[in-house]
């Protein structure tokens, strides 16, 4: 899922940057930014992750959905390219690494007996291409 969104953004980077610029401009003028953004990431992640909700628990589920949204799309691409000076491949590797570390952390919490729901491997397959 992460690779899909990040590759899509990279393939159409200029139009996505222009779109984000227009949205931010409207936001600065006092209009709601959310009214101008499609929100495909959260909706898609909801469909993909819903079967794992009971396995990870409500809090982990919502946090995971939100952080995966942060790690996909035009926003992290802009930060990685413009601020971190990474190329597309480096950006993808860093974002994939970040998500994998989060998933491993959830699994480690469960293994350590912290009584927190953990993430089963199948969800990792949906979020990260190995």
Image (cartoon, rainbow, N blue to C red):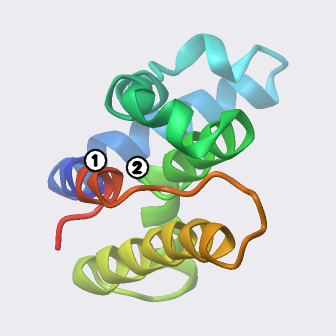
Please name the residue shown 35% across and 27% down the image: 44
> Residue 128 sits in which quadrant?
bottom left
- Depicted 79 relative to depicted 75: above or below: below
Please name the residue shown 42% across and 51% down the image: 74
Please name the residue shown 67% across and 46% down the image: 60
What secondary structure is found at the residue carrying circle 1?
helix
Is residue 10 found left or right of 38 in the rendered image? Answer: left
Which quarter of the rendered picture does the C terminus lie within?
A: bottom left
Q: Which residue is most to the front?
A: 113
Q: Which residue is most to the right?
A: 30
- Depicted 119 relative to depicted 48: above or below: below
Front residue (pair 17, 72): 72
Is residue 100 found left or right of 108 in the rendered image? Answer: left
Q: Residue 123, how many percent across, how many down?
A: 34, 50
Front residue (pair 29, 56): 56
Q: Residue 100, how many percent across, how many down?
A: 43, 73
How many angstroms separate mark 2 from mark 1 (CA)? 6 Å
Please name the residue shown 74% across and 40% down the image: 59
Q: Residues within 10 Å of mark 2 (few under 14, many from 20)?
A: many
Q: Are marks 2 and 1 in contact (CB under 8 Å)?
A: yes
Residue denoted by label 1: 5
Front residue (pair 75, 62): 62
Front residue (pair 53, 98): 53
Residue denoted by label 2: 73
Sequence-wise, the earlier of marks 2 and 1 is 1
């Amino acid at each position: 899922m992460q690779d899909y969104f990040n590759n899509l953004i990279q393939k159409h980077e200029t139009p996505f940057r222009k779109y984000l610029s227009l949205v931010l401009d409207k936001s600065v003028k006092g209009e709601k930014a959310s009214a101008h953004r499609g929100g495909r990431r959260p909706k898609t992640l909801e469909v993909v992750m819903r079967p794992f909700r009971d396995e990870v628990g409500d809090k982990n589920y919502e946090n995971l959905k939100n952080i995966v949204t942060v790690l996909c799309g035009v926003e992290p691409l802009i930060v990685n390219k413009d601020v971190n000076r990474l190329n597309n491949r480096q950006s993808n590797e860093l974002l994939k690494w970040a998500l994998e570390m989060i998933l491993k952390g959830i699994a480690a919490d469960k293994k350590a007996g912290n009584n927190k729901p953990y993430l089963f491997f199948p969800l990792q397959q949906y979020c990260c291409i190995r």
